[in-house]
Image: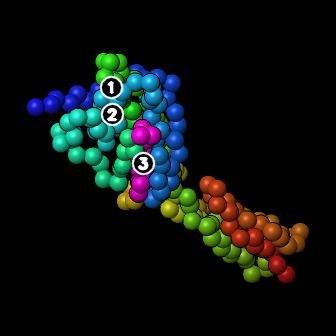
Amino acid sequence: MLLYLIIPASGSSSGSLLQGEVGGNVTVHCPVDKKKTVELFYFQHGDTYINGFHSTKHSQMPKPWNYTKVNRSEMTVHMSRLNLSHTGRYNCIISYTDGSISEEEIQLNVSANYSEPTVTTNCDEENLRCFVTCASHGGYPENQNSSTMLYSSSSTAVFNCSAGEWTNLSCSVGNVASKMVSICEY
């Protein structure tokens, strides 16, 4: 019988930051001392085992998370089909045959791009004042929709049209911009 110890995620070495996108992939590179022989590799999120291996006791490892794969020669963990719940701190824990242990903390941030913003205009009959609304959805973070954990964003601005046409206006949400529009056309 082999007993696995889940090591608390407090305290770590320098750590690194990874960015991922919903539905995308990331590869976590865990630092390994190439001069030593790895006995146990353990990748965890908080206190939860994600993936890993033992050099001799393969069948006694816990079941890995779906959509994760370990590359033993590169000491990497590939995570695919990312979702927002994957955001958080991860630990690479490597135990060597000489008894030494190394640990590295990785912060994974998962985001989602907003849709291309839509711009709608509503001008008064005299065309002296226009209300312009910019709206986007499906992004993260900002203005959370509790059913999907993704966010929507909308804002309305009022433009004084007495000076004439406003051209080449656009709005942006996150890193996504709308097409250019003109308002207050006579």
Local secondary structure at mark 2: strand
Q: Determine crowd level at label 3: few under 14, some 14-19, many 20+ residues with C-alpha closer than 10 A.
A: some
Q: What residue is rendered at 33% in x and 25% in y?
A: 95
Q: What range of the chain is rendered magenta?
A: 73-89
Image height check: is 167 above or below 185? Answer: above
Read off the residue under disc 2: 41
Q: Determine crowd level at label 1: few under 14, some 14-19, many 20+ residues with C-alpha closer than 10 A.
A: some
User: From mark 2 to mark 1, how far is it between C-alphas?
Assistant: 6 Å
Read off the residue under disc 1: 95
Q: Are marks 2 and 1 in contact (CB under 8 Å)?
A: yes
Q: Position of residue 148 (x, y in %)?
A: 40, 59
**Quadrant in which residue 9 is drawn:** top left
Q: How is the image coloured?
A: rainbow
Q: Residue furthest top?
A: 99
On residue 151, the disc is none
Q: Position of residue 168 (x, y in %)?
A: 81, 68
Q: Position of residue 6 (x, y in %)?
A: 26, 30
Q: Amino acid at mark 2?
A: Phe
Q: Amino acid at mark 1?
A: Ser
The answer to if 134 sits in the magenta stretch is: no
- Lower sequence index among marks 2 and 3: 2
Q: Amino acid at mark 3?
A: His
- Lower sequence index among marks 2 and 1: 2
User: From mark 2 to mark 3, how far is it between C-alphas?
Assistant: 14 Å
Q: Which mark lies nearer to you, 3 or 1?
A: 1
Residue 117 falls left or right of residue 185: left
Local secondary structure at mark 3: strand
Q: Is residue 167 visible?
A: yes
